[in-house]
Amino acid sequence: MGERTKARDEEFQHFVAGRWPRLMRTAFLLTGEQHAAEDLVQSTLEQVYVAWRRVGAADEPDAYVRRVMINAHARKHRRRLVEFLAPRDDSGLVREVPDTGDRIAQADDRGVLLKALAQLPPRQREAVVLRYWEDLTESQTAEAMGCSVGAVKSNAAKGIAKLRAIPGLAETVTYGGRK
């Protein structure tokens, strides 16, 4: 293995190690199931590794990786494969330490939120996860989802409206500082 290849592999390993928890969280929120999330992250990283020379040199490699993940999830959903949207048991999940400003992490019952999130259609779930859980801007979310900012606004608004309509959820979680 050449020195450049070795350095590129080490750079990729460092990137993955630093992003793994966040990638797993995003994948879990998209799929709703631990093993499906692991598969999604693995397939995403396989694609990213192949293009790592270009990705590593990009201004925002995280945005590229998010886009690959959203596309991989969308392809799986389009093929109508069975997807477990609500986890039966989250005891095997690695518990993340929430950011101090993470409003969703302040929810009394994350299980209720995850089950509610699983009830959303895929595009609404993607918009809500990226905008409110990953805290991306509307334009970053649009880029990750491969759609317009208007579509992000529409999907996020519809998703939030559906979440707010679920009894007991509005008392548990605040969205974007509003109830």
Image (tube, rainbow, N blue to C red):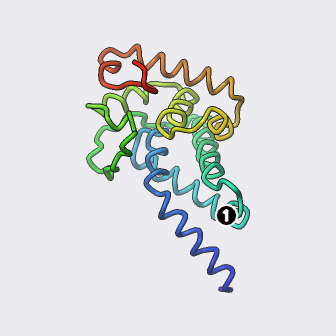
At which x and y percent is residue 76? 58, 41
**In the picture shown, does residue 60 fall above or below 15?**
above
In the rendered structure, the answer to whether residue 99 lies left or right of residue 40 reads left
Check the picture and name the quadrant holding the N terminus: bottom right
Q: Would you identify the image quadrant in which residue 104 lies?
A: top left
**Dot 1, how many residues are within 10 Å of its Cα: few (below 14), some (14-19), or many (20+)?**
some
Residue occupying image coordinates x 67% and y 24%: 151
* Image quarter hosting the C terminus: top left
Q: Position of residue 47 (x, y in %)?
A: 64, 58
**Quadrant position of residue 142:** top right
Q: Which residue is mark 1?
A: 56
Q: In the picture shown, does residue 18 fall above or below 74?
A: below
Q: Amino acid at mark 1?
A: Gly
- Describe residue 104's horizontal placement relative to residue 130 as left or right: left
Residue 105 lies, in percent from the top left, at 34, 38
Secondary structure, mark 1, is: helix
